[in-house]
Amino acid sequence: MILRIIVAFPKLEDAKKLKNVLKRNGYDDILAYNSASQAIAAANESDGGIVLCGYRLTDMHYSELYGYLPREFRMLLVASPAKLQECPIGNIMCLSMPIHSHELVSTVETMMMELSASLRRKQKLPRKKQRSADEQKTIDAAKALLMERNNLSESEAHKYIQKLSMDSGCNLVETAEMILAFE
């Protein structure tokens, strides 16, 4: 998986300057644009990465751009301290202007490491398969037994079965069957 950096600022020269700073520090896959629509198009053609942008681009506000980005992208907003105070979105990383190249590079590096780890975890997670009606009945019966016998709520009984399942290395259905077997 190749992670891309997309730099988007209203002045293309500013975007290119930041692109060059990142390039000098070992980042290769960097694109520079002056509009959010170009950044969105590039993001949609990429596996994931970071959009480094200013507060307002030629065609939209950073918050609108953030809403259009694929989930595999993170945003790094560069703006004045006053504008950053108006940033209500907690998932956006911010850098105050004027920025120093070492701050930019270390922030991008941190974001790339977090994004890589996050995407690796998502790839490793197996897809949940749907349970059959019989399997769900078995789990529900075990929960009902725990609720009656141990005076637990439905969510407490479910959590108990989940914990037993994790501790024993069995799936939920097998754990529920064991609980019912020891009734």
Image (cartoon, rainbow, N blue to C red):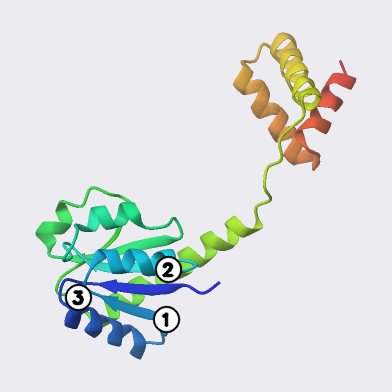
Q: Position of residue 177 (x, y in %)?
A: 85, 26
Q: Quarter of the image holding residue 32?
A: bottom left
Quadrant of the drawing holding the C terminus: top right
Q: Residues within 10 Å of mark 2 (few under 14, many from 20)?
A: many
Instruction: Tell me the number on the disc at residue 49.
Output: 2
Q: Nearer the viewer, residue 72 or 154?
A: 72
N-terminal of the pair, mark 3 or mark 1, is 1
At mark 1, the secondary structure is loop
Q: Residues within 10 Å of mark 3 (few under 14, many from 20)?
A: few
Q: Residues within 10 Å of mark 1 (few under 14, many from 20)?
A: some
Q: Quarter of the image holding residue 158?
A: top right
Q: Nearer the viewer, residue 41 or 62?
A: 41
At mark 3, the secondary structure is loop
Q: Find disc 3 in the rendering and name its residue.
A: 99
Q: Find disc 1 in the rendering and name its residue.
A: 29
Q: Amino acid at mark 2?
A: Gly
Q: Amino acid at mark 3?
A: Ile
Q: Residue farthest to the left?
A: 82
Q: Quarter of the image holding residue 171?
A: top right
Whether pointer 3 and pointer 2 mark residues with C-beta atoms closer than 8 Å, the reply is no
At mark 2, the secondary structure is strand
Whether pointer 1 and pointer 2 mark residues with C-beta atoms closer than 8 Å, the reply is yes
Horizontally, is 3 left or right of 40 in the view? right
N-terminal of the pair, mark 3 or mark 2, is 2
- CA gap, disc 3 to disc 1? 21 Å
Residue at 34 percent across and 78 percent down: it is 31
Q: Amino acid at mark 1?
A: Asp
